[in-house]
Amino acid sequence: MPLLLLILVLLVASPAAAQRLPVTAIPEHYDLWFAPDLKTDTFRGRETIRVRVPKPTRSITLHAAEITFKDVRITTGSQGQPASVALDEKTETATLTVPDEIAAGPASIDITYTGVLNDKLRGFYLSKATGRKYAVSQMEATDARRAFPSFDEPALKATFAITLMVDEGDTAISNGAQVSDTPGPEPGKHTVVFARTKPMSTYLVALVVGDFVCRGTTAEGVPLRVCSTPDKKDLTGFALEAAAQQLKFYNAYYGVAYPFGKLDIIGIPDFAAGAMENTGAITFREKYLLADPERASLDTKKSVAAVMSHEIAHQWFGDIVTMKWWDDIWLNEGFATWMANKPLAEWKPDWNVELDEVEETQTALALDALRATRAIRTNADTPEEINELFDPIAYEKSAGVLRMLENFVGKDAFRRAVASYIEKYAYGNAAAEDFWNEVTRVTGKPVDRILASYVDQPGVPVLRVAAACQGSSTIVKLHQERFSGDPKAPAPPAMPWTIPVCFKAFPDAPASCYVISKSEETLTVPGCAAGAYVNAGSVGYFFTEYSPDDVRALARKARGTLTPSERVGLLGDEWWMVRSGRHDVGVFFDLAGALATDSTAAVTTGIATRVAYAGEYLVPAAEHTKFQQWVRRRFEPVLTQLGVPGSGTDELEQERRAALLDLVGVWGASPDVQQRARELAAGYIRDASSLPGTLVASVLDVAAYGGDATLYDQYLARLDRLASEPEEYYRFFNALPYFDEPELVTRTLQFAISPKVRTQDTGTLLAGLLARPWSRNQAWTFIKEQWPHLTARLGTFQGIPTIVQATSNFCTAEAAADVRQFFAEHPAPSAERSIAQAIEKITACAAVAERQSRPLSKWLTEP
Ligand SMILES: [Zn+2]
């Protein structure tokens, strides 16, 4: 790095970097002892940290938050001395100072302390279910310091020997295998000692205490268990089966056998994240772990298997090799997201997970279409900034870029490179460069150039394509620039991306791939075609802009020439051409109409969500009836032909039926479909075997839309009885925002903040109300009034950001101003970027509505 640049970076970086620990000691090993007290919601802790002191000092600084220090001693050789403690709440650190200088070299720190089992779902915290309390942990990103004073940064790896003294009759689980379990020493307690771990980061420590019961097996010689509260044991079988298959798959893929001795997987009744990859002790939100073997929907089975697969993939990517600092969190999350589908594709080929991958990429593209997006690698220093990095850029965008690379270098070469990287950095830390240099070395392909252009630059390129046949070749002209989803605001200029582009010039030719790196390029592709599909397999991370005529031509032959993934990709591309004002909305509607009878569920879902958006935001009030008629004309016959609930057992067909039910019932406002949904819902409430699992959620949603207080009361009554059946609970819970009568919306709002709803779910329910046109204004008024209560109640990791993001469902300049002003007066530090993104989405939506309303009106009126 040139010196001037270095100075600039240091100047810019210094205030926030003050959050990082000064290097006064480097940890090597922690002996940790915890005694949670479930009566007083507190815990006692004792620890010895063995450290290396790099240079003589009288003070050592480590992290601690909400910890009350008792005795602190620092020992070097045989000389121990008491230390005084100075706390800094702002940086969440404690500085331990001794009278006599500590020599450079080995030292140990002994601390006894007490802490709080908090209700904020972070650190060592309380969860409640089945009429009792549980003590459980969530350390990532920066909350290990709430459980034990520690050097709480990912690069400061150490080994851990953990002991828990817990109530008689309770189970204790931690990262290592259980070494011993002895009564006492205190009355009514027993002490569980766990094996010393491999070197790992503090954020991966796990503590789980309660009456958990486990179902176990052995996979690849590794003892494997899935654990839950006792009432839910019947729902753990599917997760165990998935975990066993995945462990086997990953051992083969990585070429490094799972090294952590045992693997426990535990469902936690209150949990802020989806799941957490603690080394050897993965914790889960219950709804992502538990599935009724008879009645689970395809969606639930897929998400249980996919979240499991993501977390087990992390045991290598994240746990064995960890990013040096949080700015490279994509090395953890992007990898686990990309990797997760591999064992699924092998285990359940009929699930078509390659289509889920295309949808994942589209989730990321939607965020990357904003100017307020961020680069994959983004500076973050405060805990709030770090928490905000866990977004679709870290997960879905990074995964999409990795898929593009894997496709470009070849699956086997990429696997070898990944294995080599894991081996090289095992039990250590790595940065983005370490990864791309290794892949470049092993594959001999310019992966470093591609990744450098994607990792450090925000946004996404759009490729404008013009293709023409010339002799036996196709001449393809490409122009790339940064994409903006706002028709009124072009994207800022960007450096050209280095992009591997794979063409499909005509149906049967193999895709041919090129690396482009300039703003304008002309390529000669073998085979003569009037047009070309530029993103073969939909594995490229970019938008494609065809001419409107080319889109219509592709639409006509899509079902014969494009794979299902490519059809899903084409729908996404065209939708964003409309959103950005490059094409009139009619081009998308022509495409949607041409694909209305497509039998791929993901195509139907892709159409349904966008038609719903158009129906809500783009259709002028005067044309609303015409719009509903178009939806019914195009899609109701398809639904009628499929039948509801239908007789088939094909689960993907059920998904397609579910998407159509919502589209025709809610957005097409079909009285027949609404009536049918209400009959089916009533039948389902009487007899849960009357509907196939995959269809239930849609039926309950559509029945709720227009549903009355009697039906509402029935849904609420069901919720009361479903604490032990997560999937069934959320079917009814997530249907509540579909009730559109204002009094029922009020009841849902009150319910959301009542003690009946778990803190982890409040944000989701309020977001559901913000997402619906009939409840949006009412919900926003309520949220503003309740804001102090909400910020006190909800954790910073998930609840508040979820609500902030849901404000993006507004679509007027006035709403943008209102949201902006509210958050200016009520800052949400863990959602700063989300606020900017929400405001930009609202503004862009208003611009799209202004740009597309008239063309849509015209399209609807023309025959
Ligand atoms: Zn993850």
Image (cartoon, rainbow, N blue to C red):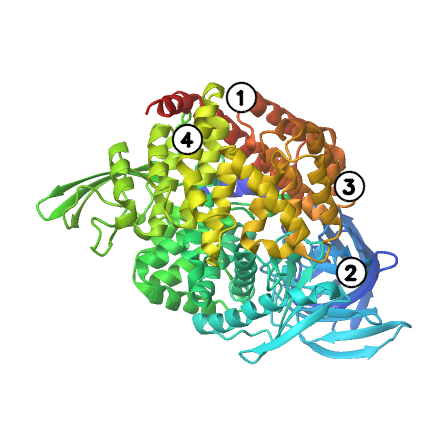
Q: Work out how far the residue at label 2 is from the one at label 3, CA to CA, in angstroms.
A: 21 Å
Amino acid type, callout 4: Trp
Mark 2 or 3: the one toward you: 3
Q: Work out how far the residue at label 4 is from the one at label 2, CA to CA, in angstroms.
A: 53 Å
Of mark 2 and mark 1, the one earlier in the sequence is 2
Q: Work out how far the residue at label 1 is from the one at label 3, CA to CA, in angstroms.
A: 33 Å
To which residue does mark 2 refer?
Answer: 134
SS of the residue under disc 2: strand
SS of the residue under disc 1: helix
Residue 706: percent from left, percent from top: 62, 33
Residue furthest top in the image:
622
Mark 4 or 2: the one toward you: 4
Q: Is residue 737 left or right of residue 84?
A: left
The quadrant in which residue 338 appears is bottom left
Of mark 4 and mark 1, the one earlier in the sequence is 4
Above or below residue 216? Residue 407 is above
In the image, which disc is placed on residue 813? 1
SS of the residue under disc 3: loop
To which residue does mark 3 refer?
Answer: 754
Please identify the quadrant where the C terminus is shown.
Answer: top left
Residue 547: percent from left, percent from top: 26, 34
Characterize the local packing of mark 1: few (<14), some (14-19) or many (20 or more) Cα atoms within 10 angstroms: some
To which residue does mark 4 refer?
Answer: 630
Of mark 2 and mark 3, the one earlier in the sequence is 2
Q: Identify which residue, 57 or 808, lies in the foreground.
A: 808
The quadrant in which residue 558 appears is top left
Amino acid type, callout 2: Tyr
Q: Residue at x 42, y 22 (%)?
A: 853
